[in-house]
Image (spheres, rainbow, N blue to C red):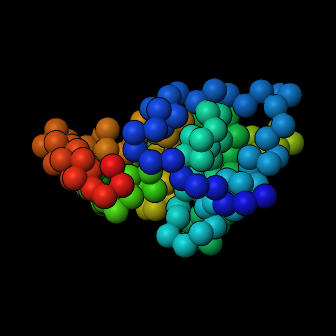
């Protein structure tokens, strides 16, 4: 398959809650595209909505670990939330500080229906929370404090791609 073009802020698919992958859905091509898309430099995760597919699936690429999850559920976050610089392929060129838990655990399945659990701290925890937000129709800027979000929206509206 191929790396797909990333949908940008303003595309309705990014604000839509994703549908579960059904038992009869043929998503092997989607998984391949998600994995190919996340392998590009500077990418920690790509959610299906970011490539225009309204299904609960995402890929990740953190510290050399590359994989995917279908129908993931965020089953645990812990620790005191920390302010972290965060960006998003769907909001290109911008990084803003937002709160994220320092630990996250996500459970889903692979193409064969086998249960997979991914957990981590640092960038992995941040990526898991970020990608789960995408599947709920939320962008990372939705979680910014009021003042930072106001500034973010101003900068986005002034960007070349908006």
Q: Is residue 110 left or right of residue 89?
A: right
Q: Position of residue 14 (x, y in %)?
A: 48, 37
**Residue at x 50%, y 70% (from the top left corner):** 42
In the picture, residue 67 is in which quadrant? bottom right
In the picture, residue 33 is in which quadrant? bottom right
In the image, residue 85 above or below residue 144: below
In the picture, residue 113 is in which quadrant? top right
Say which quadrant the N terminus sits in.
Answer: bottom right
Q: Nearer the viewer, residue 156 or 96?
A: 156
Residue at the extreme left of the image, as rendered: 147
In the image, residue 135 above or below residue 67: above
**Residue at x 45%, y 48% (from the top left corner):** 8
Q: Position of residue 137 (x, y in %)?
A: 47, 32
Can residue 138 be seen? yes
Q: Position of residue 124 (x, y in %)?
A: 51, 58
Q: Position of residue 70 (x, y in %)?
A: 70, 40
């Amino acid at each position: 398959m191929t790396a797909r073009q990333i949908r940008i802020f303003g595309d309705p698919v990014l604000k839509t809650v994703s549908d579960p992958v059904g038992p009869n859905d043929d998503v092997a091509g989607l998984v391949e595209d998600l994995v190919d898309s996340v392998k590009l430099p500077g990418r920690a995760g790509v959610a299906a909505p970011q490539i225009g597919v309204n299904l609960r699936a995402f890929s990740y690429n953190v510290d050399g670990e590359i994989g995917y999850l279908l129908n993931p559920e965020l089953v645990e976050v812990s620790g005191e939330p920390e302010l972290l610089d965060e960006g998003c392929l769907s909001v290109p060129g911008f990084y803003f500080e937002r709160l994220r838990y320092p630990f996250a655990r996500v459970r889903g399945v692979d193409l064969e229906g086998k249960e997979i659990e991914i957990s981590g701290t640092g960038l992995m925890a941040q990526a898991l929370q970020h990608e789960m937000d995408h599947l709920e129709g939320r962008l990372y800027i939705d979680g910014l404090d009021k003042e930072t979000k106001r500034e973010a929206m101003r900068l986005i509206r002034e960007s070349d791609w908006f």
